[in-house]
Image (cartoon, rainbow, N blue to C red):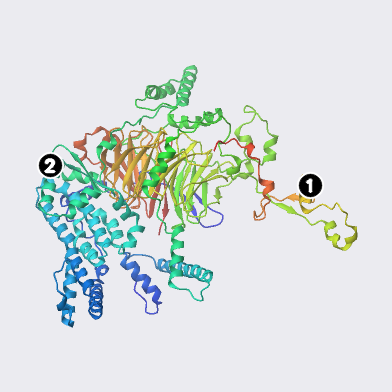
């Protein structure tokens, strides 16, 4: 199956890659080797992987020039003072620099030279104050007992950044660079992007224009250590007088103490990595109503089906229904009141239109580690660098693509093409009441098209999302607007302006009516379609919010950010109820399990993390991808988690095993079931449709 | 990517800037894009500076003009997102109001019409009236009660066929009168 658009030679190609036995994979070997490497790395925290963490030596090259220049400058000052005979200024200067000196020895060229050297060395000594303190701290940490070492090593990163900032603030750029060069290897590998950014800051003015350093200056970096470790550190710090480390700790670091023995390397590294440090577990203690109430309409539908089956004596069908009835009838614990968030009352037509979905639910394929899903992969040809976002509607009948030239294209994936409404004058002739007029009557059969192009944005379209009933589409763009489109007329309905900065992600609430957007301005906003202003603003992230995802019950929303945290927000009052730290790179994608208990997140650090929402802790860390992970999806029965990304690979993980194993066992299990490789298409989008077929899409690159 | 000896100096400067920032692997088009950007940026700044220097009735652009031009530019581009405290404050304000109640309505729930893009794209096209063309020739015959242009348009909108609505045309000269709806049609509570 392949479609060709009118204007370009872009094609959408669909091929089935399920059970592709000839794929290159050998999950056992790859998984093993990667986890081994990870173990090696994590055991030596103070010496990260040098291969990936390397700065070009030329970056530090101009050091010598600037020394010469500084020397010349100082020399000029003293020659000037000498020429004009400014004794008082001279002594004031010397006093400020703390150099004991009398005026007489400046009177010759040698005198000026020697005084210049003294002053220069004083400056260097001041810069050295930081450098030596930092090396001492490193030594202290390396020499301390192994039980404390990993917790103590968490202090290195904030102190390193603050010392660099101090040196820049003092105008001692050269010392800052040499400090950086000397000590950057003491930091963890995953900070390299931050460090690269830090190195690009070389003027006091830069500090005010960098969000990164502003965050460090204004906010506190949080570190969680055991009280024993804290005592050890404080004893060390107080043994040295006027320690700038102590100053930094009291001003810019918040320490979260806990009783008990210090954590081991695994536990420490599990939660570190976020831009502003690890969250205290106390933050994640508030109650979250994570349950997903059963759809009342579905229950009614089941009842109806059962009655009909009984009438027609179809015992087989009845048997099919009974497990569903048993599962669905029980009231779900911890689920919010249906009226907690105001939702419009469903109209009859909406309920009727859901019937095919309910039928698909009944026929849903059962998945497990031995019964793998079919995967249907759509690859986009001849559009490398143009396609930015791909999204699909829940039943998997429409696919929507956002392009960098600000166009949005929608393809129909079923034989039922894209049809629009009849013209207004034709609609006027139709009967007015609901009973007499079916949906097919208002559709213009002659308008069928395979692809529709939506024009309106003035910048690359970063994200699109279908409404749950697939009648509306929402899109977000670099131009800072969020636009609502009708899929009946294929025209634009509303333009929501609120974010001034690029909007990275939009998502419709599963309840319909509400949608959320996340932006470069570090906020998420929740909108209702009938208001041009947001109904909620969710602020708290330290950096861009790259992705947002509604909880299946519509009462919560999760967000993933460039500050390497995942947060869960309550839509009702806009409060942040969970902060998950542990990612070592930007979070690109999020997925909730259908029962609303687990949240999976993944991103640039090539790992998939699964979080337990009730307890607020990390459930498991899934390693195995060799590139950024762009997409995640839970199967409809929550037995399988699919992930895909830059490494051209779809991996299936055994969620049943993850949920049934205890914390201590998880480290030893291998959760990956199988990997499916594409030839040369990165996986951009994954979604399970209602019958549990995994639909994937990606862009072919050659 | 070996550097070419015929390469313009700016290009090699750009190359070394990228190198300094730790970018080593990029497509050749990146350099061109960056050159384009710097050219556009610098000419933009200098043009602004020229306006400021003219305003100050100076003959030549000086450093202060350029600095002012840069500062003015910084105000609306290369800006950082608002500070976190400010955003938290806004969020607190916004989130303290309860979720808005939902009106009972049918169809798609959209904002009031004036905020939507659903209105027909109309333009009022004025056809030349033969009578108007003849007017200058028959100067003497102009009656005292000759309608002004305003009244002509108004009456035309109501009943005369000399004006017609041409849908889906450029919106530049759009007659706002024809598009504007009365506010009391809206049922919003902003």
Q: Are marks 2 and 1 in contact (CB under 8 Å)?
A: no
- Name the mark on residue A636: none
The outermost residue toward the right is B141
Q: Could you tell me residue A289's position as x and y percent? A: 35, 30
Q: Could you tell me residue A93's position as x and y percent? A: 21, 69
Give the tally of numbered discs.
2
Which residue carries the number 2 mark?
A: A228
- Name the mark on residue B155: 1
The outermost residue toward the bottom is A109
In the image, is residue A433 above or below residue B183?
above
Give A406 or A154, whichever is nearer the viewer: A154
In the image, is residue A312 above or below residue A278?
above
| B190 horizontally vs B137: left or right | left
Q: Chain of mark 2?
A: A
Q: Is residue A41 visible?
A: no
Q: Residues within 10 Å of mark 1 (few under 14, many from 20)?
A: few
- Residue A115 appears in which quarter of the rendering? bottom left
Determine the secondary structure under disc 1.
Answer: helix
Q: Could you tell me residue A329's position as x and y percent? A: 39, 22
Q: Chain of mark 1?
A: B
In the image, is residue A551 above or below residue A38?
above
Give A420 or A18, whichever is nearer the viewer: A420
The residue lying at 10 percent from left, 47 percent from top is A235
Q: Could you tell me residue B50's position as x and y percent? A: 51, 71
Q: Is residue A472 visible?
A: yes
| A329 horizontally vs A143: left or right | right
């Amino acid at each position: 199956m392949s479609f060709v658009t009118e204007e370009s030679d872009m094609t959408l190609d669909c091929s089935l890659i399920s059970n592709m036995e000839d794929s290159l994979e050998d999950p056992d070997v790859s998984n093993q080797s990667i986890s081994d490497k990870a173990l090696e790395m994590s055991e030596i925290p103070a010496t990260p992987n040098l291969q990936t963490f390397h700065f070009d030596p030329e970056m530090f090259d101009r050091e010598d020039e600037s020394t010469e220049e500084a020397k010349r400058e100082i020399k000029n000052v003293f020659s000037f003072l000498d020429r004009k005979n400014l004794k008082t200024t001279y002594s004031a200067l010397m006093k400020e620099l703390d150099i004991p000196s009398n005026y007489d020895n400046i009177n010759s060229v040698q005198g000026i030279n020697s005084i210049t050297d003294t002053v220069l060395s004083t400056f260097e000594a001041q810069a050295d104050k930081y450098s030596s303190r930092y090396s001492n701290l490193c030594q202290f940490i390396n020499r301390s007992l192994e039980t404390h070492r990993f917790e103590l090593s968490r202090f290195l990163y904030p102190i390193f950044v603050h010392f660099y900032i101090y040196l820049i603030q003092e105008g001692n750029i050269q010392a800052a660079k040499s400090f950086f060069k000397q000590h950057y290897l003491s930091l963890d590998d995953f900070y390299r992007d931050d460090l690269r950014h830090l190195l690009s800051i070389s003027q006091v003015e830069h500090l005010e224009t960098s969000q990164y350093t502003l965050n460090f200056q204004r906010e506190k970096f949080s570190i969680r250590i055991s009280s024993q470790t804290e005592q050890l550190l404080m004893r060390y710090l107080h043994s040295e007088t006027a320690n700038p480390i102590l100053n930094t700790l009291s001003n810019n670091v918040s320490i979260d103490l806990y009783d008990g023995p210090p954590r081991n390397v695994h536990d420490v590294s599990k939660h570190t990595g976020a831009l502003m440090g690890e969250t205290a577990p106390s933050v994640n203690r508030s109650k979250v109503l994570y349950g997903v109430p059963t759809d009342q309409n579905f229950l009614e539908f089941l009842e109806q089906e059962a009655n009909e089956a009984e009438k027609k004596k179809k015992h087989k069908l009845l048997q099919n229904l009974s497990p569903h009835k048993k599962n669905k009838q029980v009231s779900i614990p911890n689920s919010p009141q249906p009226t907690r968030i105001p939702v419009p009352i469903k109209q009859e037509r909406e309920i009727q239109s859901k019937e095919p979905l309910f039928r698909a639910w009944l026929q849903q394929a059962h998945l497990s580690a031995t019964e793998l899903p079919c995967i249907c992969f759509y690859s986009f040809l001849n559009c490398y660098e143009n396609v930015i976002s791909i999204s699909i509607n829940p039943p998997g009948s429409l696919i929507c693509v956002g392009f960098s030239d600000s166009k949005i294209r929608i393809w129909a994936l079923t034989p039922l093409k894209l049809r629009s409404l009849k013209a207004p004058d034709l609609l006027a002739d139709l009967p007015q009441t609901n009973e007499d007029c079916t949906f097919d009557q208002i559709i213009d059969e002659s308008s069928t098209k395979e692809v529709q192009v939506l024009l309106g944005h003035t910048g690359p379209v970063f994200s699109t999302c279908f409404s749950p009933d697939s009648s509306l589409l929402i899109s977000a763009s670099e131009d800072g607007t969020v636009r609502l489109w009708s899929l009946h007329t294929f025209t634009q309905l509303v333009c929501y302006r609120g974010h001034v900065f690029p909007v990275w992600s939009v998502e419709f609430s599963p309840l319909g009516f509400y949608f959320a957007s996340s932006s470069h301005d570090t906020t998420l906003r929740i909108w209702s379609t009938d208001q041009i202003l947001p109904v909620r603003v969710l602020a708290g992230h330290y950096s861009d919010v790259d992705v947002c995802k509604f909880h299946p019950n519509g009462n919560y929303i999760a967000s993933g950010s460039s500050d390497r945290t995942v947060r869960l927000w309550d839509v009702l009052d806009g409060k942040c109820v969970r902060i998950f730290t542990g990612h070592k790179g930007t979070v690109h994608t999020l997925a909730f399990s259908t029962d609303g208990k687990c949240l999976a997140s993944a991103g640039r650090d090539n790992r998939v993390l699964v979080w337990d929402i009730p307890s607020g802790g990390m459930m498991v860390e899934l390693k195995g991808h060799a590139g950024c992970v762009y997409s995640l999806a839970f199967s409809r029965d929550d037995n399988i988690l699919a992930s895909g990304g830059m490494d051209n690979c779809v991996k299936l993980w055994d969620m049943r095993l993850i949920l049934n194993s205890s914390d201590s066992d998880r480290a030893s299990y291998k959760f990956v079931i199988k990997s499916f490789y594409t030839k040369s298409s990165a996986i951009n989008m994954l979604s399970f449709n209602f019958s549990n077929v995994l639909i994937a899409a990606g862009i072919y690159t050659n | 990517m070996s550097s070419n000896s015929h390469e313009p100096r700016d290009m090699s400067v750009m190359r070394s800037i990228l190198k300094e920032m730790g970018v080593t692997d990029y497509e050749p088009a990146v350099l061109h894009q960056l050159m384009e950007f710097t050219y556009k940026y610098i000419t933009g700044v200098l043009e602004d500076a020229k306006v400021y220097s003219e305003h100050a009735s100076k003959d030549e652009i000086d450093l202060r003009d350029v600095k002012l031009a840069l500062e003015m530019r910084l105000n609306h581009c290369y800006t950082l997102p608002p500070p976190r405290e400010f955003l938290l404050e806004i969020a607190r304000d916004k989130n303290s109001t309860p979720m808005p109640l939902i009106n009972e309505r049918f169809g798609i729930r959209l904002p009031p019409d004036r905020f939507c893009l659903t209105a027909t794209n109309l333009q009022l096209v004025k056809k030349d009236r033969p009578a108007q063309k003849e007017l200058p020739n028959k100067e003497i015959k102009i009656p005292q009660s000759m309608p002004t242009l305003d009244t002509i348009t108004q009456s035309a909108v109501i009943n005369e066929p000399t004006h017609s609505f041409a849908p889906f045309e450029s919106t530049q000269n759009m007659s706002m009168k024809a598009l504007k709806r009365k506010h009391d049609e809206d049922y919003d509570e902003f």
